[in-house]
Amino acid sequence: MSTDGSDGSIYYPERLHSAEEHLAWWSSVPVPDEVLQSVMDDYKNSRTVTVNSIVGKWEAPKRQPGWSEAEFEARVRESGARHNERYAQWEAHIPEELDRFAVRDAVRMHLAWTYRYALPAEEQQQVETAKVTVGNYTGTPAEVSTRYAMPGYAARHPEAFTRLPDDNAALRRQMAELRAEVNTVSTTAKKIYAVDLIEHGYSSEQIDAEMRGEDPGAPVGGRKALKSFKRG
């Protein structure tokens, strides 16, 4: 059995024994491009969810006995202003666009933080307080995860880091495209064949029979064939 995590993946990581091993492994584990592209594509929504989860929903303060109407309104305005200021601070902290040179390590540090529970308690503490640099930001794994809106992504896609990508999805798309092409070619070939039958004097009923694999019989002749199509 492997004891250094060499057999593990982000979907099925191996249990390591120290904070040093844990951070070293999570700092270099391969992250599939499918995951990275999904994180990049969803970043705008992930950022919004992350900020909202940190700041929370604003609620007006409850009116206290002895407050005048003017004082209550003033406290409501102050509370709203503080909420908006905090929201703006977090919006400024989490970049509007995700640095594609940082996304891989952002995923890694988010998972290093997520799976710290697999370590002994004293080692967990070391992971929680370790400082790492991702992109132009230095912080703990949790701070790095938040900086790049990973909590919002994980909330929106709870199985993204635990379910293996569907390797057959691309193959199924290719097969569907191929079937569509074959159907198009088949339809075109049938049309050409039908035109050829018309030119040889077959009626619309005879052509339908031919397409069904039945014996159409002898051609009825040009005029009769043309008349059958005019009736149709």
Image (cartoon, helix red, strand yellow):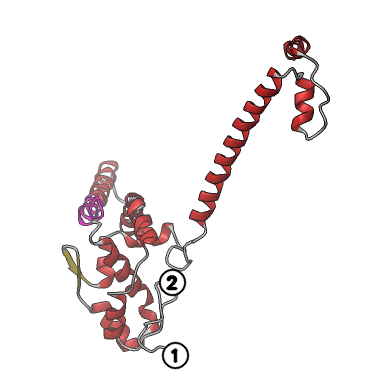
Q: Residue at 29% of width from left, 42% of height from top?
A: 69
Q: Amino acid at mark 1?
A: Met
Seen in the picture, residue 163 relative to 39 is either above or below; the reply is below
Q: Is residue 100 left or right of residue 174?
A: left
- Identify the residue at horizontal 30%, vertical 59% (top origin): 149
Residue corresponding to mark 1: 1
Quarter where residue 71 is shown: top left
Kindly state the secondary structure of the residue where label 1 is placed. Answer: loop
Q: Which residue is mark 2?
A: 11
Q: Is residue 139 above or below residue 176?
A: below
x and y, in percent, of residue 21 in the image: 29, 85
Where does residue 17 sit, x and y in percent of width and height?
35, 89
Find residue 196 and report its horizontal and vertical position in percent: 66, 23
Residue in the picture at 22% in, 50% down: 88
Query: Helix, strand, or loop for circle 2?
Result: loop
In which quadrant is the C terminus drawn? top right
Q: Identify the residue at image location x=39%, y=59%.
A: 34
Q: Position of residue 137 (x, y in %)?
A: 17, 64
The single residue placed furthest to the left in the displayed view is 136
Between the C-alphas of marks 2 and 1, the distance is 18 Å
Q: Is residue 193 left or right of residue 18?
A: right
- Return the residue nearer the eye: 19 or 56: 19
In the picture shown, does residue 166 fall above or below 25?
above
Q: Earlier in the sequence, mark 2 or mark 1?
A: 1
Q: Does residue 62 appear in the picture of this structure?
A: no
Vertical arrangement, residue 194 with respect to residue 148, above or below: above
Crowd around label 1: few <14 · some 14–19 · many ≥20 (10 Å): few
Q: Which residues are magenta?
A: 85-98
Pick the residue in front: 206 or 130.
206
Q: Is residue 95 magenta?
A: yes
Q: Is there CB contact under 8 Å for labels 2 and 1?
A: no
Q: Nearer the viewer, residue 204 or 21?
A: 204
